[in-house]
Structures are given as structure tokens and as C-alpha cells.
Image: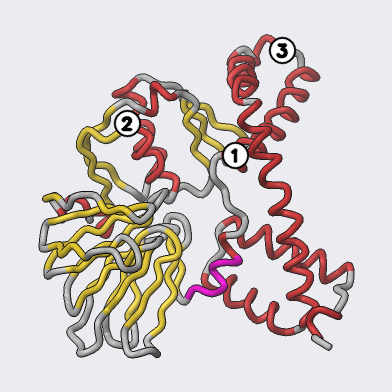
Amino acid sequence: MNQRSSVTPTPAQEQAALAWLSLLHDQPSSGDQATFSQWLQADPAHVQAYAQAQVVWELSEQPARTLAAEDAIALQGLLHAMDRSKLRTRRRWSTGLALAASMLLAVALGAGWQPGRWVEDLGADYVSAPGQVRTVTLADQSQVTLDADSAIAVDFSHGERHVQLRRGAGFFHVSHHAQPFVVAAGQGEARVLGTQFEVRLQTDGAQVTVLSGRVGVTAAQDAPQQVLGAGEQMAYGNGDAQQRHSVDSEAQLAWRQGWLNYYHAPLADVVADLRRYFPGRIVLLSDELAARRVSGRFPSKDPQAVLDALQAALGFEQHHVLGRLIVLR
């Protein structure tokens, strides 16, 4: 009989599993993740308890996302009412705070939080937390700089140096070696012998930007390969590759030095980047505002300062809810 399937967690173990799930969702340190791995491996009941906690949390995600979508107008009304809070009685303001807390949960889940991410990270070899840019050296002396909120898995055991980008983005400085170096992301991959390039996951695929050297990119298995040189970029998704084009790769990759550069970029793209550096949620409630174009150079380490600068330029409103949610409208 499979021992793992037969164990029954105790109530204390179930509570511990929920506590770990909450901690890992928030902003775990590398020490937290190491301690969690030790806890998970210490007892088969811990694995069972954590799996049960994960199922419960996953089942709550879709209803919360639906609630957030249905109540977007209600959130607008709540924020408008909060603007007039000085006219309310203490009791009515307390009611408003309770509603705000409920809305925070719904919007946070509906804004793209994925509770399964930390289970996926258990199979990753290197992870960066939100707001953390981290450089690691691999066994072949290649270096990988992980953008904030990113994760990779590394396997050098099958005749090639293979890296899977699980989340976010990585900049690869590949050492020269007889074995090819392959970065898999989405359905495609980037294959090199020695170069410097970035691979960044996107909604339906990935984007590859080359700083130096040459990179062969395929959008899917058995798809034709396109070779990118220095200063070139290409995106792919759903098995299809876009045309490669020239870019200012130094500017595109300035996040390694703590800068985010944009030229006529939609505000939605800028906010998506800032979310990786902010330890809470940033929500855009206006499609018109999301489409506004932004140009500039901003420090990634201070998302609030970036939002303040964008607010001065574009004239939108910011609302802070419970210290963890910033709503832009």
C-alpha cells in the first residue's frame, strides 16, 4: 500500500499546512523556503496536509475572481464613498472598512494572484521574491540574473544544459561549453552556445532579447528556428513566432541595474512590471487609463514613487486600501 496516500494529517498538521501556504503566498525569504522544504519532507502527513490546504485554496480562487469581476462597479462606489468618509459616523465607517476588507480579498484574487505558484516553485532550483533581483551561478559557471518574482529549474544531466523558465524573466550570461545551452519557456525554447540574452514569459508565450552573440529561437517543438543577433528581439506564443526586430537591448535590460525604461508603452504594461516589485496588489480599474501611453525611465525599487510620478503626468487617482492594495482609476 502507498504510505503517502494512507496517512491522515492531525488538526495541528493541517493548521501548520495552512500557515505555510499563507507565508509562502506573502513574500517568503530563501530561508523560509528551505525550512518549508524540510518540514514538507519530514513526514508524509505534511505532504498530505499541504495538498489538502492547496486544494481548498485553489477551489476558492475562481469564485473570488468571479466576485471581483462582478463587483468592480461596487468597488468604484466604495472608493467614492470613502472619499466622503469625514461625513460618516464612526459606525458607518466601520461598516465601510469591513466591506473594504472583503473587496480587498476579492480584487486581490481576481487581479491575477495564483496560489499554485508556490507549489510549482517546489520544483524550481532558483527563485526570486517580489522586489528581489537575484544573480546565481550555475554548475557550468554560466550566470543567471532573475528579475523580481521569477523562478527557474535547471537540469544538466542529459547531454545539454537545460533551464526551464517557470515564472517571470531571466537574463543569461552563458559560458562557452561543448554542450548546448537551452532555455525552455512556454511551448518554445532559446538555444545557444555562448552569449548574453533575456527570456521573459508573457501571457501566451515568451519574448527573447539578445544583448550579444546569437540565439536560435523556436516557437514550438518542430517549428522552424529563427536566429537572433545582438540588439534583436522576438516574441512567440501559441506555437506562432512573430517577426524578429531591432531593439535597444541595453535599455530593455536595464532592470538588472534597477531601472525600467519605456517608450510609448501602455500604462497597463508599466503597472504589470511594477506589480513584480510591489509586495501587495496594484489594480487598474479603467480600460481607458490602461491604454494611456507612457515614456520615461523609472526606478524599479520604488513602485510607489513611480506611481506618484505617473499620477502627476497622467492625472489619475490612487486609492490605498488596507496597506496592501493600490487602486488606480
Amino acid beneath label 3: Arg
Q: CA distance from mark 3 to mark 1?
A: 29 Å
The reply to whether residue 60 is visible in this rendering is: yes
Rate crowding at label 3 as few (under 14), some (14 to 19) or many (20 or more) other CA atoms within 10 Å: few
**In-image side of 251 versus 7 (left or right):** left
Residue under numbered circle 1: 110
Location of residue 270 (image quadrant): top left
Nearer-the-camera pick, 63 or 107: 63
Q: Quadrant of the N terminus?
A: bottom right
Residue under numbered circle 3: 88
Q: Does the residue at mark 2 contact the one at mark 3 (Cβ under 8 Å)?
A: no
Q: Residue at x 29, y 87 (%)?
A: 140
**In-image side of 24 versus 230 (left or right):** right
Q: Secondary structure at mark 2?
A: helix
Q: Residue at x 68, y 9 (%)?
A: 87
Indicate which disc residue 309 carries. 2
Q: Answer above or below: position of 52 versus 193.
A: above
**Callout count:** 3
Location of residue 57 (image quadrant): bottom right
The part of the chain drawn in magenta is 119-124
Q: Residue at x 69, y 53 (%)?
A: 58
Question: Mark 2 or 3 closer to N-term?
Answer: 3
Q: Secondary structure at mark 3?
A: loop
Q: CA distance from mark 2 to mark 1?
A: 26 Å
The reply to whether residue 134 is visible in this rendering is: no
